Image: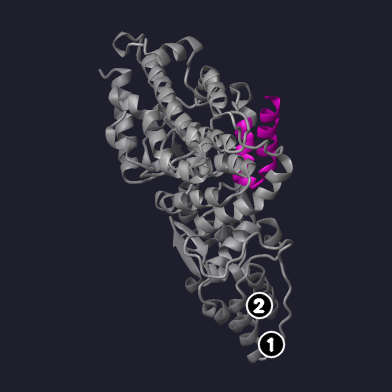
Amino acid sequence: MATPSEKLAESLEVLKSLQDQKIVAIKSRDLSRTHRERLKKNGFLLEIIKGWYISTRPEETAGESTSWYASFWEFCASYLESRFGTDWCLSAEQSLALHTGNWTVPKQLLVKTRKTTNNVTKLPFETSILEICVEIPDKEDTIIVHGLRLYSLPAALIACAPGSYQQVPTDLRTALAMVNDPSNLLERLLEGGHSTIAGRLAAAFRNIGRIQLADTIVTTMKTAGYNIRETDPFETITPMIFTEWVSSPYITRIQLLWQRMREDVLVEFPPAPGMTSDKNTYLKQIDDLYATDAYHSLSIEGYRVSRVLIERVKSGAWNPENDEGDNEHHNAMAARGYWQAFQSVKQSIEKILDGNDPGSTIRLDHPTWYRELFAPSVTAGILRAGDLAGYRNGPVYIKRSMHVPPNREAVRDLMPAFFDLLEEETEASVRAVLGHFVFVYIHPYIDGNGRIGRFLMNAMMASCGYPWTIIPVETRSTYMTALEAASVQQDIKIFTSYLANLTTLR
C-alpha cells in the first residue's frame, strides 16, 4: 500500500503536468476529487471560487495573498473565456492601464459582455470581477494580450470616461504618448461623429506637448464639418513634455512618475545639509553602523540573523563546514553576502564623496553590489554562477503586493532610463527617495532588490550629507505599506514622510 508521502507525490505529479501545460486557472474537472482534496490539505491548491483553483506553496502562511496576486491576470483570462467565449472585453480604462504597462491588480476588474446581467463575482483578498451587460467593441477594435481581451489603444482612448484623466493621469498621459500617427483615432472619430471626444483628445495631446497631433485632429474634424471645442481633461499641467513618439510605455511611465512625485518629495523631505568635507569621519560612521544595518536589512527580508552571527561572518570566524544545519547555512551565506556588498557600497560612497557623479557611480557599480551580495551562495552551491549574470530573465512577484513588476524585456529598457533620471536629478533628497522607490518598483533582479534598493538610497543620502539611514525591522509593515501606496496608488508622500522621520531621528 502506498504511503501518504507516495500518494502526495502522485498528486503533485498530476499538478505538475497541469503547470507544464501553462494552466494557471485549474478547474475541478482537471483533477480527480482525491487529488484535489489531497493537494488542498497539504497547501498546494487554493480554491478561488466554486470549481476553480490555483496552485500555491505550502510554506505560505494562512491568509497569504502572494500566490493569488501572481495568478490574478491569467486566472481571470481563463475564467472569463470559459464563461463568455469571445463575447467579453475589459473596460476601456483597464485596457489603457494594461497597454501602458500598469499590471497592478485592481480591487475590481470591470468586464463588458453581452452574455450576462450585471453581476459581481467575489474573489480572494477583497478583489472581484464586475460584469456589466453592454455592447463590446468590434473585432477590429479588440486585441488579445496574455489571453485578456482589450480595447485597442485608439478605441480605448475614444471610449474611456472623461474622469479617467483626473483619476489616473499617468496612465492617460502614457497612453497618449504611445500614439505615433492620429489616423486610427481620426477614422473612429469621424465614423462615430465624436466631435466632443475629438476636442477632448486634441486638448489632451496639447497638454502633453504633442501639438502637431492636436492640430491634425482639430483641422481634420473641422474639414469634415464638425465644430470642435477643445477642453483639457487633465487637472494639472503635464510634469514633462512629449514632443516625440515614445516607443516604450514603461519608460514613459517611470519618467512621469518621477517628475510628478519629485515635487512631493521636495515638500516632505528635510533640506539636504550638503556633502560632508570630512570623508573619513563619514565613512567611519557608516562602518560603525554596519552590524545594526545588516541585522535590520536582512531581518526585513526574512533571514534569521543575530548580531553574534553578523559579527562572526564579518570577522571570517564562521566556518561553513561546521554549520548547525541548512537554515544556519542559508542565513550565514546571506549575512556574508551582505558584508561583502556593504564593503562595495562603501567604496562607491567614497567615490561620490571624492566628487564623482552619484548617479553615474551607481550605474557602474550596482552590478558589483549584486554579485557580492550573492557570491557566497554561489560558492556554497546554493545558487548557480549564471544567477549573477545580470538582470532577471523571468517574472518576479513581490510578497503580498498588488504591484506587478515590469516584464523581463521592459526591465532592459527601464534600467538605463532609471539611471538617466538619477543622473539628471539635481536634488539629493529626490535621488534618495525616488532612487529607492523606482528601483524596487522595477524589481530588476530575481532576489535582493530590497537590500540593493536600501543601499542605493544610502549612497544617494551620502551624496549631499544625509546620514546613513537604517530601516528598522520593527517598522517593516509601515515600510512595506508605504512602498505599496507608492506603487499601487502612486502616492509617494507616505513613503517620503516615513524616510524623513527616520533621517531626522538621527
Q: Quadrant of the N terminus?
A: top left
- Give the residue displayed 54% in from the left and 77% down from the top: 182
Residue 203 lies, in percent from the top left, at 68, 73
Q: Which residue is mark 2?
A: 198
- Mark 2 crowd level (few <14, some 14–19, many ≥20, 10 Å Cα): many
Q: Nearer the viewer, residue 385 or 68?
A: 385
Please name the amino acid that badge 2 sits on.
Answer: Ala
Among the 4 quarters of the image, the one containing residue 92: bottom right
Q: Nearer the viewer, residue 185 or 372?
A: 372
Q: Is residue 24 above or below residue 466?
A: below
Residue 198 lies, in percent from the top left, at 66, 77
Q: Is residue 43 above or below residue 180?
A: above
Tag 1 secondary structure? loop
Q: Is residue 316 above or below residue 437?
A: above
On the question of residue 93 being in view, the answer is: no
Which range of residues does the magenta coloring cover?
479-506
- Mark 1 crowd level (few <14, some 14–19, many ≥20, 10 Å Cα): some
Q: Which residue is mark 1?
A: 226
Residue 299 lies, in percent from the top left, at 52, 21
Q: Is residue 138 magenta?
A: no
On the question of residue 5 being in view, the answer is: yes
Overall secondary structure of the magenta stretch? helix
Q: Nearer the viewer, residue 145 or 258?
A: 258
Is the residue under label 2 in contact with that under label 1 (CB below 8 Å)?
Answer: yes
Tag 2 secondary structure? helix
Between discs 1 and 2, the one toward the N terminus: 2
